[in-house]
Image (cartoon, rainbow, N blue to C red):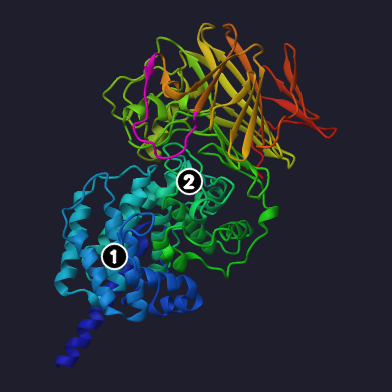
Amino acid sequence: MSSLMKNFKRLVLCCMLVFCWICSAQGADCLVKKHPVPQEHPRLLGSLDHLKELARERPEAYARVVNVARNMEAGEQNVLDSHGKMISLSLVCAIEGDKDLGRKAVEMAMKYIEAPIRVGHETFGHDMANCAIVYDLCWDSWTPEERAKFFDYMNRTVDANVNSETHVFHNAWYGYKHWGYGLACYATYYENPRAPEILAVTEDDYCKRAAPALELSGSGGGFAEGYYINYWSYEWLFFCEVANFCEGVDYYAAAPDFYKNRAVASMFEAYPGIRENGSRRPIPMGDSGGQKFRPERDKALSARRILVNHYRNDPAHQAVHAFNETTPVSGVPGNAYKDFLWRDITVARGDLQHFKLSHFSPAAGYVYARSSWDEDATYLYFKCGDRFTAHQHLDNGHFLIAKYEELAGDGGQYYYFGGDHDINYLLRTIAHSSILVKDPEEVWTNIRAWKGSIGNDGGQTHSWPHHNGAAMDVEDWQKNRQLFDIADMLAFEDRGDYVYAAGDCSRSYSPKKLDYFTRQIVFVRPGTIVIFDRVKSKNAQFKKTWLIQAAKIPTGQAPDLEITNGQGRLFVQTVLPRESQVKLCSGDELYSYDGKSYPAEDIRGPAPECRVEISPPKPEAVDYFLNVLTATDASTAAVPKGAVKETNKAVSLTVGGMKIEFIKDRVSGSIEIKGKRNPLAEKIVNN
């Protein structure tokens, strides 16, 4: 009778679990669950047999994981942090059945579990995710009391953070919060009664708010928040893979225009050249900290690998795989587990050298272009996009140029969100290669909750309801679209010999001072970049200034300057306005304007050392700026001079055997190279 009762209870339990799975499978409209969550551990990263097979297939990477687990101690983040140690211990514990390593991992996890609950803008999701990995991979090493404490820690963290990190255009929804919730729920699915319920809430919020936000602000793969995508995308994709292992869920299908393009965009968001620790430097976009080697370089690599594995039959992702394989080992020794889990050399390697040389992400308004896929390629980035969230800068029209090294970069130092240097320099237009229009009466208020004075740099406005300039979700963005829709990329086309982009940045500025500012960029490969700007102010007396953030203090004599950084050199020819006023701001003047100084108290890495300001010789309502920038190696002594012919209707530039014409009263023109004339595109022509 007792045996029959036990079997009956097992049957009832199984029926309940199947019922719960059916209900949860129907709970989130955009997610299809193909099978129930496995009951055995481990399951987050596949079965134990799967992990053992990986160890056989990837012996070199696994040997490094074993070394981390057995021989290295957690400490400096560029060597091994505590989370990397926990994951490494847990993987070796599971694969080799080493209970001693399992206990070490559990003891590390308990330090987070028994600590005070973290609330607000804290990385509580990171802690929870890594504790969940330890729980799943080292399940037999936990005592019943420790498991109960983990469930309690998990539930109390969720309850304490209901109102934390709710903005879905912001990195923290994904990286600070929900990847941790997802891993913890799948790890404890059958032991913590609240796990299915918590997971269902995350799924529902993803379908209703996060996935639409990724599609709106991340179409084309570039994410409007900018550089911060390197902080969160790996963690979120980790969770997406766990969901696929546990229930066969394809999170990527809910936001295809983002996920299918993200790996390609990420590839373009790295400067050419392999740098410290065999890594690639991500380009600066908004708040950025990537000048020196940091762990997010490994995150960017692993995020691309995850997407390559998922879209392995797609030729574009096979080209990304070839790109990834140029940096096959993570730069942080403690990140060996990332190579072990995500570097899959069975993916077909595509033809990178013949892959497209430019990419466009429409929502963020990013154009990326290279002269080739060689490491000494000339690189161009141009931004003209809408506002979505906090870490963006007032930088529409901004461009980056690199050859060997960064030549025109992003000004300022990002070390403290909301400080004096941040508010008055780093995020402002004056720290970017764009246009200033100085209305002496203009004021800025309510930026990043800063209580101090805010200077008048003459740049783009910050006039959003939230002090961070953030929309909470797509509904909020659409409701206030007239505030957030601040720029348009009007044209983009890559014809091989050249790539062309045009943007309208007018709405990024106060309408009280500006009628229009449009920027047209022609990048003629291999290294000539022509920039034509049309600027009309409301008042002719409002001084206009064309900016370039020079990596080093230029040499030469205005209007012809040279910026040399390492092996790279950028020749800057100001063709229009004629007899321009040129000022080089460096040293104590670099972070100063309008009679005030906003110095950086902390130097996090190399940043532009000179702000070049170019202004017309006399006030006019309408001004045209025409600059020819030529990127070469540092041994080049001179480049072809540009000659301009200006009429009432057009500006014609002749340089290096080519002719480019820009129409004055609209964004239009033509280009003639090698005797062949083509109109400049007037729409987006995807490549």
Q: Which residues are magenta?
A: 595-609
Most common SS among magenta residues = loop
Query: Does residue 32 appear anywhere in the picture?
Result: no
Residue 202 versus residue 331: which sits nearer the camera?
Answer: 331
Local SS, label 2 = helix
Residue tagged by mark 1? 132
Residue tagged by mark 2? 215
**Horizontally, is 152 left or right of 197 in the view?**
left
Give how far across and how far down residue 295 sits, in percent.
41, 53
208 in magenta: no
Q: Is residue 142 above or below residue 559?
A: below
**Horizontally, is 682 left or right of 253 in the view?**
right
603 in magenta: yes
Give how far across and how far down residue 455 sits, in percent.
37, 18
Quadrant (top left, top right, bottom left, bottom right) of the C terminus: top right
**Horizontally, is 492 left or right of 247 in the view?**
right
- Assess disc 2: are there few (<14), some (14-19) or many (≥20) residues with their C-alpha within 10 Å of its C-alpha: many
Q: Is residue 258 above or below residue 523?
A: below
Residue 129 versus residue 361: which sits nearer the camera?
Answer: 129
Sequence-wise first label, 2 or 1: 1
Quadrant (top left, top right, bottom left, bottom right) of the N terminus: bottom left
Q: Is residue 114 above or below residue 276?
A: below
Number of the front mark, 2 or 1: 1
- Assess disc 1: are there few (<14), some (14-19) or many (≥20) residues with their C-alpha within 10 Å of its C-alpha: many
Q: Residue at x 45, y 44 (%)?
A: 290
